[in-house]
């Protein structure tokens, strides 16, 4: 009996000591043991300068209202038949779901849009418009022809013709689609949908100021637009308004509507460690680690905004004056060594923004990942049967072009190893974790009618 009593007493003392230790640890705030996946991912987050996306800045609601009206109004196009939203639609993840956009002369929306006979597709895939208010942005367009330097200077296609007073790089970008003949402006001699001459198409491309001036004249002829501009810019007289004020409003709307910060990965970066599944975490570790993707897709925007030749198949009309070629970054830098180089895209919501690459050549994330593992082999074996039939015959594959393409593949891709099917699936799961559920609510931004009375896309 004595032995049993001693054992009981000893057990009671051990339990008491354990409870005391737990209580003392709670007072001391001893850290919990980290999940190994989270611990490794924290290291990658620090190494690749990842951070939560910045919230949309607070802006004048009247400016957002004006920008929303302009974004969906076909009045900004020369023939009054295409709006910003035609190629950047909320129901298509701010794109159009097409390899190459059908701008002027098209009918319909998204992948079902049909281009009129005699018209050309836009030469490049429509880029998404997500998170344009984040301060990390310093380039716009696939070739970076709009570029913000540390000095505050902005390189742009209009050079000295670009007006002062633009709010941000997104507003600078918004100045230029209206000047593109294929995207919005139309051709000389065009008539609009009402049979009236297209006065926006008369000027040469280099006459940016005249193009913007005629667009503002068109807008301010509409009484409701005069009211919207007056509300957004109460300190300016109508005669003081320029297209830069329209561009600022469009950018304000895009930032307000398309800043999406609630993807599982966004929430993980904000501290919700259970926002990602274990497999998505493994995919992230692979993405930023062994697979080497994070070398170009780092930072808050998941892009280094630099330019590489990853041997993207070239298709479509190409860019003047080198059409059917598209010389990419070389068009901006004027350096032949930059031929075939295009900007690293941001990957936020990437699972919803197919097709991929500047030419829209790939429709599946798996195919894009495989292409990165061996760009030369993938390029040479490219199968065009997944493309819309009119595009299949435009894929450039002559021997001389192929040789130049594969000879200039960027060495940065050498870090990407061969990947197993399981690893590719893990990468896809991570990329899917970059999609925000807010994508499902973007339709709410579509107005019931346009200010001009033209149809809404």
Image (tube, rainbow, N blue to C red):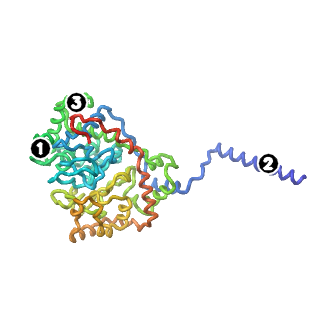
Instruction: Name the residue furthest right.
Output: 1
Q: How far apart are marks 3 and 1 (CA)?
A: 24 Å
Residue under the image location 15 percent in, 58 percent down: 321
Tag of residue 2: none
In-image side of 238 versus 354 (left or right): left
Tag of residue 12: 2
Task: Determine whether the residue tagged by mark 2 lies in a helix, strand or loop.
Answer: helix
Q: Quadrant of the C terminus?
A: top left
* Residue 161 position within the rendered picture, expressed as x and y whole percent measured from the top left: 17, 44
Q: How far apart are marks 2 and 3 (CA)?
A: 82 Å
The answer to whether 299 is drawn above or below residue 250 in the figure is below
* Residue 60 position within the rendered picture, expressed as x and y whole percent measured from the top left: 32, 32
- Identify residue for label 3: 224
Task: Determine whether the residue tagged by mark 3 lies in a helix, strand or loop.
Answer: helix
Residue under the image location 36 percent in, 54 percent down: 303
* Residue 11 position within the rendered picture, expressed as x and y whole percent measured from the top left: 79, 51
- Identify residue for label 1: 191
Name the front one of labels 3 and 1: 1
């Amino acid at each position: 009996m004595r032995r049993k009593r001693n054992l009981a007493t000893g057990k009671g003392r051990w339990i008491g000591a354990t409870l005391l230790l737990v209580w003392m640890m709670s007072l001391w705030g001893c850290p919990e043991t980290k999940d190994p996946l989270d611990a490794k991912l924290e290291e990658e987050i620090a190494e690749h300068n990842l951070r939560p996306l910045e919230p949309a800045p607070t802006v004048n609601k009247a400016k957002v209202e004006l920008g929303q009206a302009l974004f969906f109004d076909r009045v900004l196009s020369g023939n009054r038949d295409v709006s910003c939203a035609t190629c950047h639609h909320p129901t298509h993840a701010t794109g159009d779901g097409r390899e190459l956009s059908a701008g002027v002369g098209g009918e319909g929306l998204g992948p079902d849009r049909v281009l009129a006979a005699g018209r050309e597709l836009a030469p490049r895939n429509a880029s998404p418009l997500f998170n344009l208010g984040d301060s990390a942005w310093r380039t716009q367009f696939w070739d970076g022809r709009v570029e913000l330097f540390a000095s505050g200077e902005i390189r742009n296609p209009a050079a000295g013709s670009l007006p002062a007073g633009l709010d941000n790089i997104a507003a600078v970008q918004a100045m230029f689609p209206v000047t593109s003949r294929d995207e919005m402006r139309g051709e000389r001699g065009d008539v609009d949908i009402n049979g009236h001459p297209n006065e926006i198409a008369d000027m040469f491309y280099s006459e940016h100021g005249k193009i913007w001036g005629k667009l503002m004249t068109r807008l301010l002829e509409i009484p409701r637009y005069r009211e919207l501009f007056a509300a957004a810019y109460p300190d300016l007289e109508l005669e003081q308004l320029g297209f830069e004020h329209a561009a600022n409003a469009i950018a304000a709307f895009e930032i307000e509507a398309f800043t999406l910060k609630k993807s599982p990965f966004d929430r993980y970066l904000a501290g919700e460690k259970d926002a990602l599944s274990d497999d998505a975490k493994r995919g992230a570790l692979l993405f930023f680690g062994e697979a080497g993707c994070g070398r170009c897709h780092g930072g808050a925007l998941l892009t280094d905004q630099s330019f590489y030749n990853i041997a993207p198949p070239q298709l479509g009309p190409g860019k003047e004056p080198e059409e059917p070629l598209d010389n990419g970054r070389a068009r901006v830098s004027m350096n032949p060594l930059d031929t075939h180089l295009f900007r690293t895209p941001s990957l936020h919501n990437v699972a919803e923004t197919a097709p991929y690459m500047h030419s829209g050549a790939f429709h599946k994330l798996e195919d894009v990942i495989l292409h990165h593992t061996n760009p030369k082999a993938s390029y040479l074996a490219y199968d065009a049967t997944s493309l819309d039939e009119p595009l299949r015959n435009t894929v450039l594959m002559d021997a001389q072009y192929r040789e130049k393409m594969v000879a200039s593949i960027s060495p940065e891709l050498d870090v990407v190893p061969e990947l197993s099917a399981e690893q590719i699936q893990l990468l896809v799961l991570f990329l899917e974790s970059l999609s925000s559920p807010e994508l499902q609510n973007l339709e709410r931004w579509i107005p019931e009618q346009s200010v001009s009375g033209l149809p809404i896309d």
